[in-house]
Amino acid sequence: MDYDQLDEIERPLKEHWEERMGDKLYALVSPVWEDWILPSLKKQAREAKCTQDEFREWWIRAMRLMEDLFESLHFNYRYRFEHGPEDEIPRFYWRHQQFDFLKANDAKGGIYIEKADMLKVAAEYLSRPEIRTNMFDWLLLDSIVFAELDAFTSHIIGSKISTSLAAAGANGNHTKYFALVALFGAIGIALSYLTPPALAILAFTKGHNITGWSIAGLWGVSLIWTLIGVPTRWKVRRKNKELLTNLNDLYRILGDSTISPRVLKDALDKAAASGVVLDGAVFSIVDRMIARDATTFVPTSVG
């Protein structure tokens, strides 16, 4: 089939899916589809000398996965299109994110990822090698790694009351966040290490010896327990920092316009060795990249 015949097959399909999706969704899907996914499908159809029915099936399957992936990246987008809030309405299909730890698990910008649905799309896509494209490979890699980085960062910030409250109060301002962390840390030290002995001394001066010794004893036990837990907490903190650094390094590579599959694989293996858990789809896509060309991967190239 030549490109004119492929265009004839595509025309009614495009009209049907544009009507099915609606103007708002199709306006976000269309640029990615028209610029990269569809040209790759057409090229592969010609190289494989597929029939009209086969190309029609490829087209429908790829477009359905495009819609499903969008749904998983911008969950409940139809409600947001109609009811907002304005800063949570999707404005793009997907783009590499400039990661900010203060925006972890934040739906502003229209990103609200349903991980299970996203991984279902990845599994379906990998089971259909005939519709494989560079752009779809990259979309899945970038969104899956970002989802893990975002979730892990949110977990770390939410694991301590001080950082959780500081992040909520900072409203995205880094200077304000670190100032609040310092403030809450100082309050915590005062409440944990200064207030109990002060209360014990006050009790002794008022003649309440039993109360004073009780407070002093509880404070002593608390202090010993805190000191015992220092090595464990330090180990956990160091491990979390290592995982976050490796995940961030891996995600940063995916933001390049030209990616080295070997470098990407090394970063992926390093992250996995440190304890980062990523879905098998990530490894499958990277392995497939290396099998095709271990030196260069360009997400925007047709093919």
Image: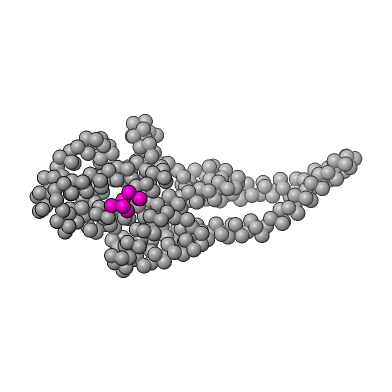
Q: In this image, 270 relative to 45: left or right? A: right
Q: Residue at x 36, y 34 (%)?
A: 80
Quarter the C terminus occupies: bottom left
Residue placed at 14% from the left, 51% from the top?
A: 51
For the point 58% across and 60% down, which residue is it? 238
What residue appears at the point 28 percent right and 39 percent down from the top-left corner? 25
- Residue 40 part of the magenta-drawn span: no
| Position in image of residue 96 (x %, y %) | 36, 53
Q: Nearer the viewer, residue 270 or 176?
A: 270
Determine whether 82 is above or below 217 in the image.
above
Q: As rendered, which of 140 and 86 lies closer to the eye?
A: 140
Across and down, in percent, residue 127 comes to 31, 52
Can residue 209 be seen in the rendering of this structure? yes
Q: Is residue 300 left or right of residue 266?
A: left
Q: Quadrant of residue 200?
A: top right
In the rendered image, the vertical position of residue 19 relative to residue 158, given as above or below: above
x, y percent for residue 170: 52, 44
Residue sticking out furthest to the top: 83
Does the magenta segment cover residue 124?
yes
Location of residue 290 in the rendering, given as x and y in whole percent from the top left corner: 32, 65
**152 vs 62, nearest the viewer:** 62
Closest to the observer, 10 or 150: 10
Q: Is residue 284 above or below residue 198?
A: below
- Magenta span covers which residues? 123-128
